[in-house]
Amino acid sequence: MSNSSSIRHFLLLALADTQQLQLLHFCLLLGISLAALLGNGLIISAVACGHHLHTPMFFFLLNLALSDLGSICTTVPKAMHNSLWDTRDISYSGCAAQLFMLVFFISAEYFLLTIMCYDRYVSICKPLHYGTLLGSRACAHMAAAAWASGFLNALMHTANTFSLPLCQGNALGQFFCEIPQILKLSCSHSRFLREHGLLAFSGFLGLGCFVFIVFSYVQIFRVVLRIPSEQGRHKAFSTCLPHLAVVSLFISTGTFAHLKPPSMSSPSLDLALSILYTVVTPALNPLIYSLRNQELRAAVWTLMTECFQEH
């Protein structure tokens, strides 16, 4: 038995049992993280450098790419280090920092996806008011609110989680530090309930964002289906489908990873789901957006062509 004052480090879950499989996981994580860095980096550069992309939709897409990069860089480097050097250690302060950054980036991403849904709603359902409702100042304020809300959410959860006395050892059943795994080590009933209250509040806020997204898309589809020309409907759908795909992937993987029935839980499935929503999803987002957006593809291609010509 130990308490939190005596814990100097945590033991993360190993990705594999053998050295060969650990090296394989290292290579897979390296490939996925490089793809995420390249894809999100190209989106950030293309939007920042392409003046014709300085619109609300691409401004929020740039912020989304930043949050994807942040979540990848929070979990993957430590997992790659542990796989390469066959270790499981993470320091107490390192675990707190990792948990804070992960909650921060994931929360900010969810709020940004909600704002991007509002952008699509105004664009299609209230096009005459688009410039008024989504001016440059309004967009900056909404993006700042998303990042600030993510920061406050992460600060509250990290401060409360790491104030819990821990008396169930220091082994975490996950390859990164997350709140449910640390709660399993707690021996304080009152603080445990307080953290669950915070989780319930965050869940209620997330549910509110989800209801807003569903309601907005119901309105969007009603308007789009009334467009007389097939070309007009296709153009309207093409601006919404990438966002809808990203939202569906983000919500479905995260929700199933944390709310799946206990009977379906197994170490291998839990590990696969956690890799899916923390590593694979941020890497896929740039691909999803670039596949359906010809303007973005053209800007990325122009950027890459200019870089090759300079060298």
Image: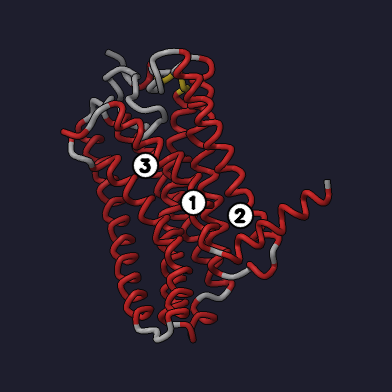
Q: Horizontal and vertical percent for residue 38?
A: 61, 44
| Residue at image point 83% right, 50% down | 310
Residue 293 or residue 160, whichever sits in front: 293
| Residue at image point 33% right, 61% down | 209
Q: Check disc 3 and report the residue beneath it.
A: 157
Q: Horizontal and vertical percent for residue 73?
A: 54, 37
Q: Say left or right for 140 vs 17.
A: right
Q: Check disc 1 and report the residue beneath it.
A: 285
Q: Earlier in the sequence, mark 2 or mark 3?
A: 2
Q: Report how far apart the C-alphas of labels 1 and 3 lie in the structure.
A: 26 Å
Mark 3 is on which residue type? His
User: Within 10 Å of the Cα at label 3, are there few (<14), some (14-19), or many (20+) other Cα atoms?
Assistant: many
Q: Check disc 2 and report the residue beneath it.
A: 43
Q: Horizontal and vertical percent for residue 131?
A: 54, 80
Q: Nearer the viewer, mark 1 or mark 3?
A: 1
Q: How is the image coloured?
A: secondary structure
Q: Secondary structure at mark 2?
A: helix
Q: Report how far apart the C-alphas of labels 2 and 3 lie in the structure.
A: 31 Å
Mark 1 is on which residue type? Asn
Q: Which residue occupies the extreme right position in the image?
A: 310
Mark 2 is on which residue type? Ile
Q: Secondary structure at mark 1?
A: helix
Q: Say left or right for 310 vs 15.
A: right
Above/below status of 56 relative to 174? below
Q: Secondary structure at mark 3?
A: helix
Q: Report how far apart the C-alphas of labels 1 and 2 lie in the structure.
A: 10 Å
| Residue at image point 20% right, 32% down | 189
Above/below status of 237 relative to 175? below
The quadrant in which residue 124 appears is bottom left
Q: Which residue occupies the extreme left position in the image?
A: 263
